[in-house]
Amino acid sequence: MSERAAAPLLALGLAGALAAGAMLGPYPLSPVDVAETLIGRPPDPQAAIVLWNIRLPRVVAAALIGAALAAAGAAYQTVFRNPLVAPDILGVSQGAGLGAVLGILLGLPVLAIQLMGFAFGIGTIALVMAIALALRGMGQVLVVVLCGMAVAAIAGAGISLVKLMADPDDQLPAITFWLMGSLAGIKQADVAAALPAIVAGLLPLIALRWRIGLLALGDDEARTLGVEAGRLRLLVILSATLVTAAAVSVAGVIGWVGLMVPHMARLITGPRFDRLLPVALAMGAALMVLVDAAARCIAQQEVPLGILTAVLGGPVFLWLLARGGRTWAE
């Protein structure tokens, strides 16, 4: 399918996903209910409360987080020239998770827990870069990735230790549920808190998408074309880390989106980052909105997002591997 033909389908798919996210849930709303509520004439007061206070914040948050994780995954895969790289490759998700579970263990309010998750996520990437620099490997992608894996393992061990120390009747269930990812308690204030960081991280990726695509050619070729590869790679990593940390601090650890969506988008756009990024943003937003809607509809108890993305992502990724495995091996 050509990009020109896919563009209207993507727009319709995203609009349909947003509409479905607004309508589906334990208190279902019809399209007419949603439309009338949006123009200030709700069919009943409860519909207005559900749509404005519960459903729309979740839809906006899911779209932002899905777009952020998909963009971060596309950026990491391009910068590291590795199709298996995901937003958690440098330990950002694990670091943010450690900060959040520490906040839960200390009994902090929700906003403080989110801030700790965000701060630990940023601190993790700073630690990874510092170690790589000390090893004189900042210019070597493999060294940065290996440092990220080591720091992620340490953060994972810290999470296990916190779970061991947590109250098994109160804190441990909260930690476990948070680590599996959820938007059940999202509020307008949470969306407002995460929005600046996500936008600040996405703007450089969008503005520099043509230059970022040159990094896939290799540093020497990028320099030949006038791009300072080292500085641009550092900016991309920091931007992708910022959006990942912001997303994890709000919704918990949600895997597979940053790995799966860029590969799905490449089926339409090919490998060029300037074409890949807009499609990945739209597909990531639509996917996460639909997954969140399914999470609150398929069972009496809300299903964590991380479980659904894993159930969906595993088979889809295997299909993508079977379809394009030879290309990845090149």
Image (cartoon, rainbow, N blue to C red):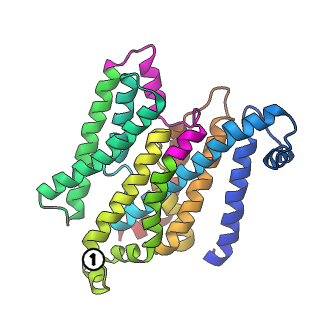
Q: In the image, is residue 320 part of the stretch drawn in magenta?
A: no
Residue 7 found in image quarter: bottom right
Left or right of 97 on screen, residue 224 = left
Looking at the rendered image, the quarter that the C terminus falls into is bottom left
Identify the amino acid type marked 1. Glu
Q: Which residue is mark 1?
A: 228
- In the image, residue 171 lies in the stretch drawn in magenta: yes
Q: Is residue 329 above or below residue 61?
A: below
Identify the residue at image location x=56%, y=56%: 284
Q: Is residue 27 left or right of residue 270?
A: right
> Where is the N terminus found, in terms of image quarters?
bottom right
Locate residue 182, reporting x and y percent: 54, 36
Q: Quadrant of residue 231?
A: bottom left
Left or right: where does residue 148 sit relative to residue 244?
left
Q: Secondary structure at mark 1?
A: loop
Q: Pick whichever, 101 or 161, lies toward us.
A: 101
Could you say which quadrant of the image residue 22 lies in? top right
Residue shown at 37% from the left, 40% from the top: 96
Percent position (x, y) of residue 226? 30, 84
- Residue 115 placed where, x, y %? 40, 38
Residue situated furthest top in the rendering? 169
Residue at x 52%, y 74% (from the top left corner): 275
The magenta stretch spans which residues? 165-193
Q: Residue placed at 70% from the left, 70% from the top? A: 8
